[in-house]
Image: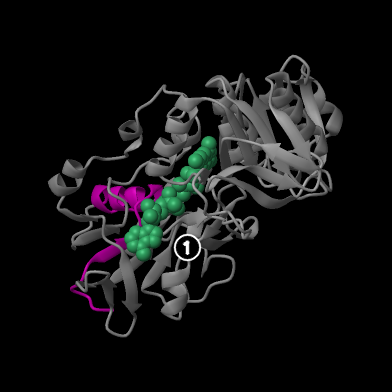
Amino acid sequence: MAASDGTVIIGGGLAAAHAVQTLHENGYPRAITLIADEAVAPYERPPLSKDFLQGKQEAEAAIVHDADWYSAHDVTLLLGEHAASIDRAAHTVTLDSGAEHPYGHLLLATGADSRRLHLPGADLPGVMMLRRIPDAEKLKAAFANGGRLAIVGAGWIGLEVAASARQAGMEVTVVAPGSTPLGSVLGDQLGNHFADLHRRHGVELRLGAHVTGIIERDGRAAGLETSTGDVEADVVLIAIGAVPAVGLAEAAGVKTDNGVLVDSALRTSDPDILAAGDVANAENTQLGRLRVEHWDNAIRQGQLAAKTILGHTDRYDWQPYFFTDQFDLGMEYVGHAGPDARTVIRGDLDDGEFIAFWLEDGVVTAAMNVNIWDVNDTLRSVVGTSVDEDRLSDEEVPLEDL
Ligand SMILES: Cc1cc2nc3c(=O)[nH]c(=O)nc-3n(C[C@H](O)[C@H](O)[C@H](O)COP(=O)(O)OP(=O)(O)OC[C@H]3O[C@@H](n4cnc5c(N)ncnc54)[C@H](O)[C@@H]3O)c2cc1C
């Protein structure tokens, strides 16, 4: 490692912002350079499918630190600059502009990109995806025109946009291949709960349906062809997941496999290069190898990568956490349940306020609080322990006593 060189971070998301903040807060003595190809300083994406689309929050409110914060803390912030390549032998990053930046440590916080639908017509005007602020602005402008929205995918982003679009008065159809939305994450019982929520609010769910084509009219997308018939629409949103942005790492010969492979200190196969956030497929000391695409993980891994650079011995040892807000349902989930986990409910699914637990071999592997607040830290402490099913479901047993 070139000892006199500082840290270069590539990426303009939460992992990058929190890595910079942690380096700064811990008195990192060397130069910090942040290379981010979006036009604005690193920001939080969750509002893009919720409060921003619903007109409750401006996009700028999601920015973690404004550009002045970086200059006030001696961080070189290069916005609108795309890192083109890494020369590991020379310890340099080259930008599209040709500028070279030497590094001692390099952090890859390049996140993920929306997964593309490989069908003719997927690039037509009227077909959208949602990852960045300009995507959200385009979608919000489409909401203002009203009409019909067809969403491909019943994952978190597809369902959150469905809820926001209904609240904006659009007619919404969600097309997805599974028998329940979110079934692969939550299982059928909770997946059906989300399906009911959406149907109650007027979303049409076309489940068990495959998209076979995009309907084109006058050079624009006019809906979807599906295995269960056509869905006419004014706007189409493709929300079929995300793919980790591993191109730079791969080209530099850093090991990848469903993300950039990192150890529990977030070091890649090159000890001077780390990866954090959506792009990192990391060794969790409790759960094994995981790549997590969630807000909390990007924050914590950004912090952990900084600590590794600072010489601390912290490890990736926490349970994943995420949240969603759809219509009148707000929830937090902690843990990592497998597809065959058993679900136990505490409370009443019908009244919308309950806690779900997932159990595998008698051990609680995940828990989710729905419209019940200030309990997630307690649930976190239950995850990983063995608890009798009857006690889990018995509301008379305080959560703290589980
Ligand atoms: C619409 C939406 C809603 C979401 N809602 C939730 C939610 O409710 N709850 C939750 O837990 N999670 C949610 N998430 C997920 C969460 O936002 C992500 O997990 C988080 O953004 C990951 O942060 P990151 O820093 O790893 O990557 P990203 O946020 O993807 O940031 C990576 C950045 O790096 C930049 N970049 C990539 N390559 C280069 C390069 N070569 N040169 C320069 N810059 C580059 C990218 O342009 C991007 O700005 C949501 C995501 C989206 C898109």
Residue depicted at 38% across the width and 49% down the height = 13
Quadrant location, the C terminus: top right
| For residue 122, above or below residue 147 | below
Q: Quadrant of residue 237?
A: top right
**Mark 1 residue CB less than 8 A from any atom of ligand 1:** yes
Residue depicted at 22% across the width and 67% down the height = 6
- In magenta, the rendered stretch is 1-26
Query: Is 22 covered by the magenta stretch?
Result: yes
Q: Which amino acid, by three-letter code, is at mark 1?
A: Ala
Query: Is 398 covered by the magenta stretch?
Result: no
Q: Left or right: where does residue 170 sit relative to residue 186?
A: left
Residue depicted at 71% across the width and 23% down the height = 197
Residue occupied by mark 1: 245
Residue depicted at 70% across the width and 38% down the height = 231
Q: Left or right: where does residue 387 sit relative to residue 315?
A: right
**Residue 198 at what x, y percent from top left?**
69, 26
| For residue 325, above or below residue 308 | above
| For residue 42, above or below residue 49 | below
Q: Residue furthest bottom?
A: 89
Quadrant location, the N terminus: bottom left
The residue nearer to you, when weighing 167 against 104, is 167
Q: Is residue 7 visible?
A: yes
Helix, strand or loop under label 1: loop
